[in-house]
Amino acid sequence: MTSTILVLGGNGKTGRRVVERLAERGIATRIGSRSAEIPFDWNDRETWKPVVQGVSKAYITYYPDLAVPGAAETVGDFAKLAAAEGVGHLVLLSGRGEPEAQQAEALVQQSGAAWTIVRASFFHQNFSENFLVDPVLSGEVALPVGDVKEPFVDADDIADVAVAALTEDGHAGEVYEVTGPRLLTFAEAVAEVAAATGREIAFVEVPLDAYAAVLLELGEPQETVDFIRYLFTEVLDGRNAHLTDGVKRATGKDPRDFADYAKAAAATGVWNV
């Protein structure tokens, strides 16, 4: 029997999908967020112990990203407390190709609980549920990236891997690097979105400094802009330009292709103008 599972970031892109899948299985779920019945805040350690009490397993996502200074230590401290409170299995959403994220992984692995690591990079859903929605709607996606190939991965596949690890035997001690089935440049991904919508959507490569300046002018916090700088100078430099079998190994199914995602997203009307 699986008792209550904690989902940190249960309102986020992968977290809410994990919550939905656990609910479909009739598994008791506790959402870890500041607005939840039992509030949780990464920046308020007084909220940590109450949220893990009575929990058997936990899905850990860290906002805004594990690359933020101090994030690895914070996640490690939480993992150690959770293990001490009886949480038996921790599933961490980590960043593929991010040394800082691997530091967090190591600390989770040392927590005393069983663990599973899910390493992901750029989500399909960043085009439909995050910062690229407005550029797609405007007809021009400008990013500080060139011909780098990225193994875009679907948030639904990430959630499926996480739920498998949380509900099935055989996933403890596994590191699942998850990717889509093919490599695409950002220009090629935008072209897929354009094809799905039937609209002309241009991709434009822009200098990073100019991109960061625009973000600040639009009111984005410095922390977010700093992360974008990190993302487009270090992570999106080609280091992840190879495919893995993480989704298949964890779930037994092939990962979702970007073109299929784009068609499904377009059908929801999210990119209608």
Image (cartoon, rainbow, N blue to C red):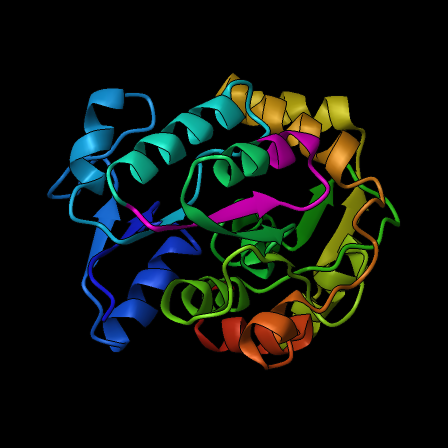
Percent position of residue 161, x then y: 51, 66
66 displayed left or right of 13: right
- 144 or 11: nearer the viewer: 11
Which quadrant: the N terminus? bottom left
Q: Is residue 70 visible?
A: yes
Q: Quadrant of residue 20?
A: bottom left
Spot the residue most to the right.
147
Count of number-bearing discs: 0
Point 17% across, 41% down: residue: 53
Residue 89 among those drawn in magenta: yes
14 displayed left or right of 217: left
In the rendered image, the vertical position of residue 223 relative to residue 48, given as above or below: above
Point 64% across, 31% down: residue: 228
- 59 or 111: nearer the viewer: 111
Residue 86 among those drawn in magenta: no
Point 69% across, 28% down: residue: 230
260 displayed left or right of 38: right
